[in-house]
Image: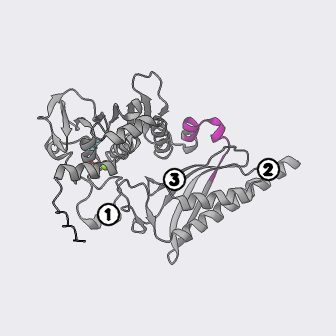
């Protein structure tokens, strides 16, 4: 048989490339909310309010009271790879901001309709402008505005039929969005958060800034969780194996739940770490007789050069230097905390 002629290779159109990339950064409505809230946190906001319609497919609106965006920057705001947070690759090593890729807003304009309203300190009025496929649809319009920035995304995935269909056929993202805001709210306790459905009178997450982590957890997850928590702390300064500080609140033996809630921040980034979660579940199962699944809020701080934040476009995972050593140390901190509380309880029951 005669070999078939190979197909020709051609360059993809830039708009196709951008839309493909956007679908990866913004996987679902909740990923858009995460990016927007992180931008608000990066802008030093003290108040962040989220409104959602139709699970985020019709509308996601995030308003903050942060530093705002300069008028001069509006034309490139939603272009791919434009950012105020990173200049040199080396800066990644010490970066404190959540964002750095300059991709989130751009991505949203490739898969939805984005409108930005913003005002910077000392200005008499703000500006409003809408974006499509990375560019402004018109000159920014002067408008009344309160301090900060409001970003609105309408009709998410309007141009991605398959994605929209899958999302419409499954349970909507609103519970995931509420869960996300709940997690942010118990870590950033100096920020007021709210999250509500469009048109709803009541917010589903509503926190006011406090200095007590436990108060924040109580207001978000309820009294029944908060009253069964213990404070935990651990640290290691052994430069040869691992350096870290950890503190958090973890459930005691009276806490009952069917599944584990693990709220983990590493260097102030909300991340997942399956290995650490497993390791802790093992300690609980081995130490507590009733073996309920635990509630864990934990904040780990490491030297920033020990954390690689750039392993995934959604920044959902990070990779840690000496991960095994750190996990082991955290496990033993949990073990002694749980043992002690168990002994205290037995003691109380006897007396
Ligand atoms: P990144 O966060 O990686 O820089 P984004 O696309 O999320 O990229 O945002 C691009 C830029 O827009 C940010 O670097 C920031 O300067 C600005 N920006 C975005 N959202 C806000 C906001 N809520 N308040 C102030 N500036 C913002
Ligand atoms: Mg960002």
Give the residue drawn at x 22%, y 35%: 119
Instruction: Report the magenta residues as a range.
Output: 217-231
Q: Nearer the viewer, residue 256 or 192?
A: 256
Residue 5 picture location, percent across and down: 18, 67
Point out the tag, 1 or 2, that comes first from the N-terminus: 1
Q: Residues within 10 Å of mark 1 (few under 14, many from 20)?
A: some
Residue 299 picture location, percent across and down: 51, 55
Q: Nearer the viewer, residue 214 or 335?
A: 335
Q: Residues within 10 Å of mark 3 (few under 14, many from 20)?
A: many
Point out the tag, 3 or 2, that comes first from the N-terminus: 3
Q: Inspect the magenta stretch and tell me whether residue 26 lies in it.
A: no
Q: Which mark is residue 92?
A: 1
Residue 124 visible in the displayed image: yes
Label 1, label 2: how many angstroms apart (C-alpha)?
Answer: 47 Å
Asked if the residue under mark 3 is in contact with the one under mark 1, i.e. CB atoms within 8 Å, the reply is: no
On the rendered structure, is 59 left or right of 330?
A: left
Disc 2 designates what residue?
Answer: 345
Residue 154 picture location, percent across and down: 29, 33
Q: Main secondary structure of the magenta part?
A: helix
Label 1, label 3: how many angstroms apart (C-alpha)?
Answer: 21 Å
Q: Which mark is residue 324?
A: none
């Amino acid at each position: 048989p005669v070999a078939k002629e190979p197909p020709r290779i051609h360059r993809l159109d830039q708009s196709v490339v951008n839309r493909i990339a956007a679908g990866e950064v913004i996987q679902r409505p909740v990923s858009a909310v995460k990016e927007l809230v992180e931008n608000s946190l990066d802008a030093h906001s003290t108040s962040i309010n989220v409104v959602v319609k139709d699970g985020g497919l019709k509308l996601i609106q995030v308003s903050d009271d942060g530093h705002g965006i300069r008028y001069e920057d509006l034309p490139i705001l939603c272009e791919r790879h434009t950012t105020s947070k990173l200049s040199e690759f080396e800066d990644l090593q010490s970066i404190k901001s959540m964002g750095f890729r300059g991709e989130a807003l751009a991505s949203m304009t490739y898969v939805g309709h984005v409108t930005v309203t913003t005002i910077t300190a000392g200005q008499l009025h703000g500006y409003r402008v809408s974006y499509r496929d990375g560019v402004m649809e018109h000159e920014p319009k002067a408008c009344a505005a309160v301090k900060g920035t409001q970003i609105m995304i309408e009709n998410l995935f309007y141009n991605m039929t398959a994605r929209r269909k899958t999302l419409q056929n499954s349970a909507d993202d609103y519970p995931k969005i509420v869960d996300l805001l709940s997690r942010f709210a118990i870590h950033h306790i100096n920020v007021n958060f709210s999250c509500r459905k469009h048109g709803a009178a009541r917010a589903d997450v509503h926190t006011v800034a406090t200095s007590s982590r436990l108060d924040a957890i109580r207001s978000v997850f309820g009294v029944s969780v908060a009253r069964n928590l213990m404070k935990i702390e651990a640290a290691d300064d052994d430069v040869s194996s691992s350096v870290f500080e950890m503190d958090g609140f973890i459930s005691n033996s009276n806490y009952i739940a069917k599944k584990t809630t693990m709220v983990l921040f590493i260097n102030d980034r909300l991340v997942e770490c399956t290995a650490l979660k497993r390791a802790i579940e093992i300690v609980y199962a081995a130490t507590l007789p009733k073996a309920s699944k635990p509630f864990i809020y934990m904040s780990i701080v490491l030297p920033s050069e020990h954390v690689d934040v750039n392993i995934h476009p959604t920044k959902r995972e990070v990779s840690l230097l000496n991960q095994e050593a750190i996990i082991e140390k955290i496990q033993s901190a949990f073990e002694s905390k749980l043992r002690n509380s168990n002994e205290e309880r037995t003691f109380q029951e006897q007396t």
